[in-house]
Image (cartoon, rainbow, N blue to C red):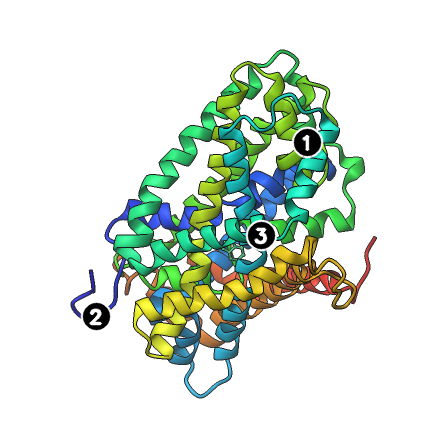
Amino acid sequence: MADIQTGRDSFSSKFGIIAATAGSAIGLGNIWRFPYVAGENGGGAFLLVYLIFVLAIGIPVMLSEFTIGRGAQLNAFGSFRKLKPGQPWYLIGLMGVAAAFMILAFYTTVAGWTLEYIYQSLINGFSGKNPEQLHSMFESFTGGSWRPLIWYALFMGFTGFIIVAGVKNGIEKYTKILMPVLFILLLVLVIRAVTLPGAGKGIRFLFQPDFSKIRASTILEALGQAFFSLSIGMGTLITYSSYIKKHEKLGQTAVFVALTDTSVAVLAGLAIFPAVFAFHIEPASGEGLAYITLPNLFQQIPGGYLFSLMFFFLLGVAALTSTISVLEVIVAFFSEELKMTRKAATWTATLSVSILGAMCVFSTSLMANVHIFGKTVFDLLNFTSANILLPLGGFFIVLFVAWFYGTEKTKRELSNNGTLKARYIPLFIFIIKFLAPIAIAFVFLQGVGLIKLS
Ligand code: TRP
């Protein structure tokens, strides 16, 4: 329902805010990417560095986005323009909208695969296949063109269906159901994995710090992972927080969401590695871990049919609560700045994103030979959004709040004009003035290859 004063939709409850925001953060980044990256980068040692980055940089960037969004009560572009009229800061918002297009295109491609794998789980399609056959099953599926495109379109359709219903009756309503489902499924999978005989090796793989694997590149990898996983740097959280009411405690929300996101990443690792090690399966890299290694595993464990179905459903749910948050960035921009109705904005955005999305889907088939800067469309959008646009956006977002929006206004926003206790503010200001921008600049320069540390 629209707010009486502003005419804008908003979240109706604290749980709704948490479900939506945590839903955005928790996604393929946690369940599919984190376990593998952590495993490759020294397990527990990576986890330690990652945790430090989430606390010291991730939370401050998140809180900066909250400050902007709730302060302005507008979409990412409009927020910057309202808070600093006549200055080109709105370009950061525009960059966020562009990043949203790119992320939706490649992210939804991977999300669409979950639908194929839910279907395969249902019809028991993995049964009797050896690792090589499962491998070629994945390759021939992604190497086809129509099947993955249909799954892509269906996933985009689900995303649009939720977004068109609005903030309270769409985003909030569905994330409030889907997030608890996700937690229950994840817990069941973790319990299954850690109680397998021989699970200890996988647990050690994830937690035992191997400091010899920590390099400069590892540290930067951890920061990049933190940005992507927390959904920061492109205005998703500016947009979501513009629907948060003034009496809510933003600091508390940021800390809670960041810690929940991190816990889910760790739990996903706990659901995957003990099982992988218990069955002596080589942990494959990248998408292979979820789509090749796990089907192999599910065939070997008691109850595998059900666990397979649960895992891919979990992955799909996690992805859906993230894709809606990215689509909302574009829809809020289209409807508030281009004055479209929500319905027109949603379907215009969904359709135009799908054109770019089709090119990502075709990156492993019809367009496998199309290379731009030496990369397929999928790889290019993945690389550009995560390694360039997010750090750049995050950098300017903290600079904006710390140096241009100003300390006084920030204090007033976070404390709701002094009515809420927020003793962390001086520490927060210090971090966003100095620590966060320097650290982010570092990742960015490494990401684009301007500095090479190892
Ligand atoms: N954080 C999500 C994940 O880990 C993905 C995501 C959603 C995202 N919104 C974002 C990433 C905005 C970057 C920016 O899967």
Q: Name the residue that disc number 3 marks.
A: 146
**Residue where numbered disc 2 is placed:** 7
Residue 179, given in percent of the width and then of the height, sits at 38, 40
Q: How much space separates mark 3 and mark 2, taking CA atoms?
A: 42 Å
Mark 1 / mark 3, whichever is N-terminal: 1
- Which one is in front, 313 or 435? 313
Count residues near mark 1 (Cα–Cα under 10 Å), then give few for <14, some for 14-19, many for 20+: many
Determine crowd level at label 2: few under 14, some 14-19, many 20+ residues with C-alpha closer than 10 A.
few
Amino acid tagged 3: Trp
Mark 2 or mark 1, which has the lower sequence index?
2
Query: Does residue 108 appear in the picture of this structure?
Result: yes
Q: Nearer the viewer, mark 1 or mark 3?
A: 3
Residue indicated by mark 1? 134
Q: Residue at x 73, y 57 (%)?
A: 368
The answer to which quarter of the image holds residue 275 is top right
Placement of 229 over or under 6, stated as above or below: above
Indicate if the residue with disc 1 has its beta carbon within 8 Å of ligand 1.
no
